[in-house]
Amino acid sequence: MLLDETPLFDPSLLHELDWSSCTVTFSPLISPSSPGEGLVLRPLCLADFNRGFFKVLSQLTKTGNVTPEQFAKKFEDMKMTGDYYVVVVEDTNLGEIVATATLITEHKFIHACAKRGRVEEVVVTDVCRGKQLGKLLVSTLTLLSKRLNCYKITLECAPKNVGFYQKFGYVAADDTYMQHRFFD
Ligand code: 16G
């Protein structure tokens, strides 16, 4: 099956972000347009199935065995809604995905029919830790949610990662996160 390079969303959204309003500091300086030597930050595309996208996700949680057909169907469904911003970092020398994160915009009637942003599946492959890629991805999606007029952006994380997300302005809410799992 043809797994092509069509992006999930308009890549210019990433490059037109006002990076000067980013409150986190990078040393050395990196940005969505220059994520580091040999790296590219861009929207997910179908061809990323063969670039180890699921190998990266499997470092976060169970992914299950997904076929190319299942992946393509989910990708098209997500693309059609216009609310899924899955970004990846590719090591272009290896042709491998090394990091990913997702912004989802959820539509509301409250707050004058506003949108809420959700950050999901933030993963940097173990061999690429220390290159500020997690910081780059979270900064990018946080700025993007603001650009898309979300009234707030939220995420769930392990207690050990609270300090990491605080750097971007996230604060632990009084609300308790609850879940009811139907399967793992
Ligand atoms: C983490 C992720 C969340 C993901 C979940 C998977 C971030 C900020 N949070 O909480 O997006 O869905 O792990 O865990 O990346 P699960 O497989 O137990 O649902």
Image (cartoon, rainbow, N blue to C red):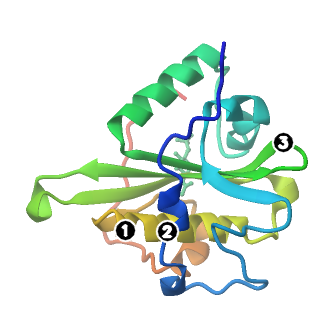
User: For mark 3, what is the residue?
Assistant: 95
Mark 2 or 1 closer to N-term?
2
Residue depicted at x 76% and y 85%: 27
In this image, 128 relative to 33: left or right?
right
Q: Which amino acid does label 3 sit on?
A: Gly
In this image, 42 relative to 8: left or right?
right
User: What's the CA distance linking mark 2 and mark 3?
Assistant: 25 Å
> Can you tell which mark lies on residue 4?
none
Instruction: Provide residue 146's location: percent of width, then percent of height.
Output: 36, 70
Residue depicted at x 73% and y 57%: 40
Is residue 175 placed above or below 70 in the rendered structure? below
Residue at disc 3, secondary structure = loop
User: What's the CA distance linking mark 2 and mark 1?
Assistant: 10 Å
Is residue 45 placed above or below 85 in the rendered structure? above
User: What's the CA distance linking mark 1 and mark 3?
Assistant: 30 Å
Instruction: Provide residue 3's location: percent of width, then percent of height.
Output: 66, 23
Residue at disc 2, secondary structure = loop
User: For mark 1, what is the residue?
Assistant: 147
Residue depicted at x 46% and y 68%: 142
Mark 1 or 3 closer to N-term?
3
Instruction: Provide residue 52's location: percent of width, then percent of height.
Output: 77, 36
In this image, 105 relative to 90: left or right?
left
Q: Which amino acid does label 2 sit on?
A: Glu
User: Does the beta carbon of the residue at mark 3 sit less than 8 Å from ligand 1?
Assistant: no
> Can you tell which mark lies on residue 16?
2
2 and 1 marks in contact (CB < 8 Å): yes
Quadrant of the rendering where the C terminus is positioned: top right
Instruction: Provide residue 175's location: percent of width, then percent of height.
Output: 30, 65
Mark 2 or 3 closer to N-term?
2
Whether residue 67 appears in this view of the structure is no
Residue at disc 1, secondary structure = helix
Q: Which amino acid does label 1 sit on?
A: Arg
